[in-house]
Image (cartoon, grey):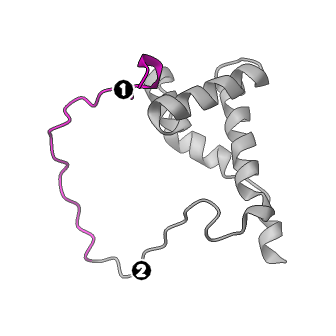
Amino acid sequence: MTPSMTPAPLSNPTARATPRAFAHIDTWVFDLDNTLYPHHLNLWQQVDERIRNYIAKFLDTTYDNAFRKQKDFYRRYGTTMRGMMIEHGMNPDDFLDFVHQIDHSPTSS
């Protein structure tokens, strides 16, 4: 793995997370990309474009530079959102709200 591909270290990789109580949940839905909806509906492509738009606006940069940042963060951190949070202090709620405002009409046909 090259240095640029090395993920950022965790603050304490041996620490255990506090267990969460999920006994009250009786149904789980996992939305894996292109699993619930077929790829040809292009829902992910809409999200991908909105991620780029968010980065361009948030960092006040060009669309091309936002594209490079998006792919770089994805490679280095596993998700673009994690890279934006770590390197730029981005609020994940604002990001998720924005990037998921897509046209869902293809799912109704």
Residue 9 quadrant: top left
Question: Image check: 53 left or right of 14?
Answer: right
Find disc 1 in the rendering and name its residue: 8
Query: At 61% from the left edge and 68% from the top edge, which residue is drawn?
Result: 35
Please report the bounds of the magenta region as a residue range: 1-23
Whole-number angstrom distance, CA of label 2 to CA of label 1: 34 Å
User: Which residue is outermost to the front?
Assistant: 1
Q: Residue at x 74, y 58 (%)?
A: 43
Q: Quadrant of the N terminus?
A: top left
Q: Secondary structure of the magenta portion, mostly?
A: loop
Q: Amino acid at mark 1?
A: Ala
User: For the point 77% across and 25% down, which residue is it?
Assistant: 63
Task: For mark 1, give the secondary structure.
Answer: loop
Viewer-nearest residue: 67 or 3: 3
Q: Please determine whether, in this image, residue 20 is positioned above or below residue 27.
A: above
Residue at mark 2: 27
Q: Position of residue 81 (x, y in %)?
A: 52, 37
